[in-house]
Amino acid sequence: MREAVITTFGPDHAEKRHFCRMSVTAELTYLLPGENTLYKGLCNNLSHSGIQFITEKLLEAGQRLEVTIDTKSAKFKPMAVIVEVVRVEPSESNTYRISGTITEYR
């Protein structure tokens, strides 16, 4: 598995962002409450309060997920968070772009 690619860019005041958003290309896994199936996705960007990723599973706004991002780098430990899905957009190749709010760090 490849090591994640991380690029930072500062707060975008035009978008009224409070935290720096990072372009992160890293594999992630997530669980839905009450399910034992581990789903996979690819993180696009990440900030202190939000995440965007691509997945093959259609999710719905309001769903809560247990997400783990492992950059496969000795520089960064795996990060586990609870995410509430805010927006779902169809993407290319029968995938979905998921935008979510990080509500809890584990």
Image (cartoon, rainbow, N blue to C red):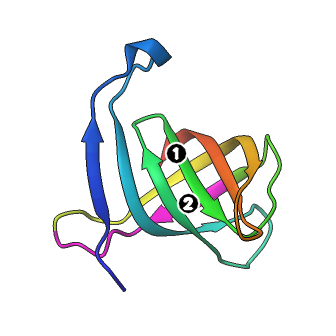
Tell me which segment is drawn in magenta.
65-74
Q: Determine whether the residue tagged by mark 1 lies in a helix, strand or loop.
A: strand
**Horizontal and vertical percent for residue 38?**
66, 77
Compared across the picture, whether 7 is left or right of 101 comes to left
Residue, x 49% and y 18% (percent of image)?
15
The tag on residue 74 is: none
Q: Can residue 87 be seen in this snapshot?
A: yes
Mark earlier in primary sequence (1, 2): 1
Q: Which residue is mark 1?
A: 51
State yes or no: discs 1 and 2 in contact (Cβ < 8 Å).
yes
**Horizontal and vertical percent for residue 8?**
26, 42
Q: Is residue 67 magenta?
A: yes
Q: Nearer the viewer, residue 65 or 8?
A: 8
Q: Which residue is mark 2?
A: 67
Compared across the picture, whether 3 is left or right of 43 comes to left
Name the image quarter holding residue 100.
Answer: top right
Residue, x 49% and y 59% (percent of image)?
43
Q: Residue furthest front?
A: 92
**Horizontal and vertical percent for residue 61?**
80, 42
Q: Determine whether the residue tagged by mark 2 lies in a helix, strand or loop.
A: strand
Quick one: label 1, few (<14), some, or many (20+) residues within 10 Å?
A: many
Name the image quarter holding residue 17.
Answer: top left
Name the image quarter holding residue 20.
Answer: top left
Residue, x 27% and y 49% (percent of image)?
7
Q: Residue furthest left?
A: 75
Q: Can residue 106 be seen in this snapshot?
A: no
Residue type pointed to by label 2: Val
